[in-house]
Every structure is written in structure tokens, then in C-alpha cells.
Amino acid sequence: MTAIILVVAAFLLLLPFVYESRNLLILLTQVFVFSIFAMSYDLLLGFTGIVSFGHAMFFGIGAYSMGIFMKRFEPTLTVFLLAVLTTIVLTGFVSFLVGLLTLRLKSHFYAMLTLSLSGLFLVLAEKWRTMTYGNDGFTFRVPELFIDRTNFYLLCLVVMVAVFLILKRFTNSPLGRVLQAIRENEQRTESLGFQVLHYKIAASVMSGVLAGIAGILYAISLRFVNTSVFAMDITLDALLMTIIGGVGTLIGAIIGAGLIEFAHHWLTELAKEHWIFERWIIFFGIIYILVVMFFPRGIVGTLSTLSWKRKQQPAVKKEEKIAG
Amino acid sequence: MDLIINLALNGLATGMLIFLLAAGLTLIFGLMDVLNFAHGGLFAWGAYSGLWIYSQTGSFIIGIIGAILTGFLLGIITEKWIIKPVYGNHVQQILITLGLMLVLSEMLKVIWGPNQITASPPDYLKGSWELGGVIIIKYRVFIILVGFVIFAGVQFLLKKTKIGLVVRAGVMNKEMVQALGINIQRVFMFVFMIGAGMAALGGVLLGPYSGVIHAGMGMEFAILAFIVVVIGGMGNFKGSVLAAILVGLSGSFMAYYVPDLSLAVNMLLMAIVLIIRPQGLFGAKG
């Protein structure tokens, strides 16, 4: 498994030097950005069992922080780093507050509350026109280093791999184990003496900050930001990607992001042939419902269960023989 | 004075529309422990299908009936095929109903196109009355009346009929009702159907009221309905009507005096209620 990942990563790293295609580069960059976002969502949904419908707010905070810093000040690397820092502080703070609420609110209420909180951010972005230019959004210049698409592609790839490794380490750490225990049975974890709230806040902050970083990269890739970064659609994207790819696997989030971004690209092109492809999201909606119903572990989870079963089968037969 | 009466009527009418959506949500939640994130989709479906029938037949009444029937049908389908397979699993329920919301609103765009559709009330509900210098728009009064009729009807159904008795008992203790030999699954389906029908009715009434309908309106109103359900108390039918009127009135007055904050105030109200008094402002379940 690790070997495959390494080969794929090396391939992606070399790709811009051997194959010149601006469109593909931009598309892959988009995949990386959404992979980061989906992985951060997976930490909540797949590992801790928290359903949030407001993940877009962290994404949007990241995107707007970067946009506003780049617009107001000179687009230099220092300002870029300042914007990153601001994003981390802001998303960390907001996700800490939101995480605090998970203590009192169980599944339904939390989903509803996050949904309306992110709606609040959307309203804020629309109304605070002096800062955000409202619905129309604004364009901005980016640091020279990122003007080159290849550089930016590499940056996103590196960040994605780093986030993957960090989250892998994070979820396999003792802390991550407790998170998974919370997902399986919150009361039992609590009665074992764990301060469930602390762990949930840790997951929430980690996830929020990473989503903010995804937002930063998204804003730079477009060099434009408007209120759509706070929209429900962004949260829905993360949901579709993690669920279809496979919850609680991290790699599933990346695969899901790749699938959806590529499908989006191709299906929008097909829209010239038949208008139904313009509504491509409906196919994913239906697939999503079927996955939730029949394969709750998504593509990656289902595949790994299958291969695990295959490995187990000969052993079972042998046992049967012995028993017979 | 003129202004205040108009704002109040406006708020009441909006409140009644939200009530139609929230009532189903709260009943379904109280009985089945399912928070239906697709409820806004049913609302939008009611609007589109009802107005389409209205434009085809020319009769608003037939349009309303069509919308309610669409709601019933979608409610039955949703309950049977989407929600039943995941009963008891909260995370799956939340995820699947949100997915359904996505599919429902995309389907609207597939069938009726992605653009806004305009709607206007039938001739006999157009225009306004003048009472002592105050201009009262007929259609608003019509919505308020319909809202009260539906409230009274559901209240009658809950309090005076056998099925209502079963529903109320089911809200208190599902297992006991089942143990007494009542097919609770049927009751679930019935309540879901009624809830979906009310949502669809709300949708079709909204069309001529706001003048345009679009596929995104389901989610907009669903958020308001969630706010109402939380403020009124989950599963509390009477609480939902009071909360809906409260949210409608506050929305209409705030929209006039401090337009930038109207939605924000309602959301903050919900957040505060959730944190301080999760059982809702209007007392315990029942």
C-alpha cells in the first residue's frame, strides 16, 4: 500500500516536467486543494464521528484572509506568511468555539448549528462590503513565486502529502485512538475516564485549521475570492468526496476528491453534447445516497474489506477441514 | 400605524409559511427521531409542481391540491426508500437526508430549468383592501388564514382522532405503542406523508407571495424552519407555531429597521437557545 502511494506521489511530482498541459496542471492543483479539505473533513466525520454541515466556514475564512491580505498589502511572501498565520489563528479560534459546542449538542443539533453558523459567515461576507466587496468578490495579485503554475502545483502537492502524513500520524497516535473510540461509543469512552470534550476540541481545531489552509490554496489558485467559498456547496463537496471515497481512511478522501474533480471537468465538457451533463452533481447525489445506504465505508473501505476477506478465506477453509 | 400593521401582517404570513415547513419537521422528529434535512427539498418541490399545474390548468386551487399530492407522494417515497433503511443510525440519517436534499433540488433544475420562475396570485387574490386608511394585501391574509386552518386541522387530528392519539403516544414511547399491537411503521409513514404535504403546501403558497421561485429556496426556508423547530422545542407542535410566528415577525420587523441583521439575529437566537435551553423555549415535549 505504501509503495503504491509513493509511486503515485513520485509520478505526480515529475508530471509537470514531462507532460506539458496547463489544463491538467490546474485540474490536478484543484484536486490537491480539495483533497486537503476533504481529509480535514474526514478527521471529523470518519475518525471522530462528528457530522458538521458548516465546514465551508473554515475554508472561507482561509480564502478570505488570503484574498484580503493580498489585496490590501503588497503581494510578497512575508504578507503571504502573515495571511497564513492569520488564517491559522482565526480558524483555530472559531473551530475551538464550535468544538466547545459539541459537548452540549448531539448529532442532529450540532449538524443544524454548524449549518446555520456557516450561513452566518456567508451573510457576513455578503454584507461587509468594504472588506469583501460583497457577492461580486474581488481579484488580487499573488506572490511572484506562485504566479508560475508549476511552482504552485508543486506547493499544493507537497502540502497535500504533508497533511496526509500529519493526519496519518495524528489518527494513529494515542489521541487518534481515543477519537475513534469516541466515534464508536462516546459514553463508554467517557466512562473509561477520558475527557471526551478535550479530544473532540482537539479534532475540531485540527480539522478547522487544515480546512483553512485548503481555503488559502484555493484562493491563490483562482486569484479571486467571492462569497461562494462560504456556500453550502463547498461543504457538500467535502461530504461527497469523503463519503464516496471512504470515510475514516484519509486516502479515500483524496480518491474521492480526484474522482469528483475529474468527473466535474469531463462532465461539464460533455454538457455541450447533452444538457443533462450540466447537472452532473445529480449523479453524484444518487451515488452518494446509495453509498451511504449500502456501502457506508465508501470505495476504499469496501475494497479493503473485500481484499481482507479474500485473504481470510483459505484460512477459514483449512479450519473447516480440521474441524471436519 | 399603517406601517406597523403591514409589517406585522407580512411577518405573520411569512411565519405561517415557515410554520407549514417546521410543523412537519417537528412532528417527524418527535415521533421518529429523524431530523429530515431534505424537508426543504419537499417544500421546493411543492412550489414547482404546484405552480406548474396552476399555469397549465389556470386554477390555483387545483395547483394547491396538486402540490399537496406531490408532497404526499414524495413523502411516502422518501420514508419508504430513503429513511427506513437507516432507522436508528443518526449519522447515516443526517447524511442520507442531506444527500436527498441535493438530489431533489438538482432534479428541479433538470425538469424546470435552472432559472427563476415567476408566479403571481390568481385574480381573486390579487390587489388589496383598504380598511380605515390601512392597505391590506389580500394574498397575505389568505396565507395567514390557510396557516391557521392547517394548524387547527392538525391540532384536531392530534387531539381528537384515534390516529392522533397513537401519534401522541408514539412521541412519548414508541416501544410501548408497538407492544400494544399497533403497527408503528404505518404511523411513521402517515406522519411523514402529512409533514411532506404541509411542506409542499407551504412551497406553493410561497410562490405568488414572493413572486419568484428558484431551486435554492428550499434550503433557505429549511434553515428558517430549523431555527423555528429549535426555538419551539424539538417535537413540540404547538411550540413550532409560536416560534414560527416569532421568527416571522422578527424577520419582517428586522428586515425593515436593520435589514443587514435580519437573518443573523434569527440564527443567533437559535444558537443561544441551543446552548442554553436545548429543549426549546416553550416547555417540555408534548
Image (cartoon, rainbow, N blue to C red):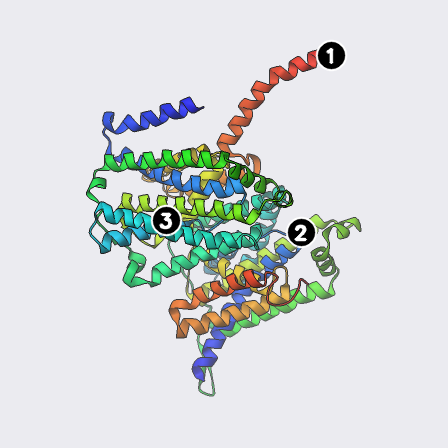
Q: Do the residues marked 3 and 2 share a common chain?
A: no
Q: Residue at x 38, y 25 (%)?
A: A6
Few, some or many C-alpha atoms within 10 Å of disc 2 (few <14, some 14-19, many ≥20)?
A: many
Horizontal side of residue A24 vs B272, given as left or right: left
Quadrant containing the C terminus of chain A is top right
Q: Is residue B19 above or below residue A266?
A: below
Q: Position of residue A283 (x, y in %)?
A: 45, 39
The Cα atoms of the two marked residues, 1 and 2, are separated by 49 Å
User: In terms of secondary structure, where does tag 3 sit?
Assistant: helix
Q: Residue under circle 1?
A: A324
Horizontal side of residue A85 vs A179, given as left or right: left
Q: Is residue B82 above or below residue A305?
A: below
The Cα atoms of the two marked residues, 3 and 2, are separated by 46 Å
Amino acid of disc 3:
Ile
| Residue B96 visible, this orientation | yes
Which is nearer the eye, A96 or A106? Answer: A96
Q: Position of residue B9 (x, y in %)?
A: 49, 75
User: In terms of secondary structure, where does tag 2 sit?
Assistant: helix
Which is nearer the eye, A70 or A234? Answer: A70
Q: Residue under circle 3?
A: A88
Chain identity of mark 1 = A
Q: Residue under circle 2?
A: B188
Q: Position of residue A293 (x, y in %)?
A: 57, 38
